[in-house]
Amino acid sequence: MGEPPRAPPLEPQALAYDKPLCVSLDGFTLHAATRAGALDPAGREALLRYVLRPPVAQGRVEQRSDGLVRITLKKAHSDGTIAVDMDPLSLLRRLATSVPPSRFHTVEYAGVLAVDVLACPTCQGRMKLLALVKGPPSIARCLATVGEATEVPQRSPGRGPPYWKSRVLRRQVLGEEDEGGGGRGGADEVA
């Protein structure tokens, strides 16, 4: 019957952020248009299912007769691997690493859902906004006021290749020839 017809390759397209409350700027994106209100049970359920999904789907885990646990992968790896077999203890060890320590927040918010930036991290008191510094001259003036450097520090020069004290090791690694038979320098050296 021949080969099945192939679909034309997909052209890469930029994401559109023309919805309200969506923006993309300088490589950062904010999508605040998705919401689940109090009167939207289907939206709340979809949001909770997304947040509470397990690390491995139950349908992809299989207990084998030889005592191993097989986890079928969503997509085959580049080397053709489609499943991973491991003993139950190894699986539990790997799963335990995904459990956060107690009182440790795993969900961090950014943008409109970020934490209160005006709370002082030291005393938890309220901080005041003193200035909104945007331009390079203003930034330099503010840094100079508080005694910080205003110029970019100089880069350190690159270090040279490693130096080994053992001539035998240098000859083996670098293929150096022993010139002059013993001392540093030779007859060709000019003062």
Image: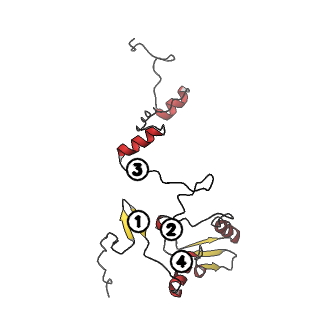
Eye-nearest disc, 2 or 3: 3
157 vs 41, nearest the viewer: 41
Type of the residue with mark 4? Tyr
Q: CA distance from mark 1 to mark 3?
A: 22 Å
Q: CA distance from mark 1 to mark 2?
A: 14 Å
The circle on residue 29 is 1
Dot placed on the residue nearer the N-terminal end, 4 or 2: 4
Eye-nearest disc, 3 or 4: 3
Dot placed on the residue nearer the N-terminal end, 1 or 2: 1
Type of the residue with mark 2? Leu
Quadrant housing the N terminus: bottom left
Left or right: residue 118 versus residue 29 is right
Q: CA distance from mark 1 to mark 4?
A: 20 Å
Residue extending furthest toward the top: 191
Numbered disc 1: secondary structure: strand
Type of the residue with mark 3? Val
Quadrant housing the C terminus: top left
Image spot of residue 72 (x, y percent): 56, 76
Residue topped by disc 4: 50
Eye-nearest disc, 1 or 3: 3
Question: How many other residues sit within 10 Å of disc 1, few (<14), some (14-19) or many (≥20)?
Answer: few
Residue topped by disc 3: 133
Q: Residue at x 53, y 82 (%)?
A: 44
Picture layout, residue 46 above or below residue 139: below
- The part of the image, by quadrant, that contains residue 157 is top left
Question: How many other residues sit within 10 Å of disc 2, few (<14), some (14-19) or many (≥20)?
Answer: few
Dot placed on the residue nearer the N-terminal end, 1 or 3: 1
Type of the residue with mark 1? Thr
Image spot of residue 188 (x, y percent): 39, 14
55 vs 117, nearest the viewer: 117
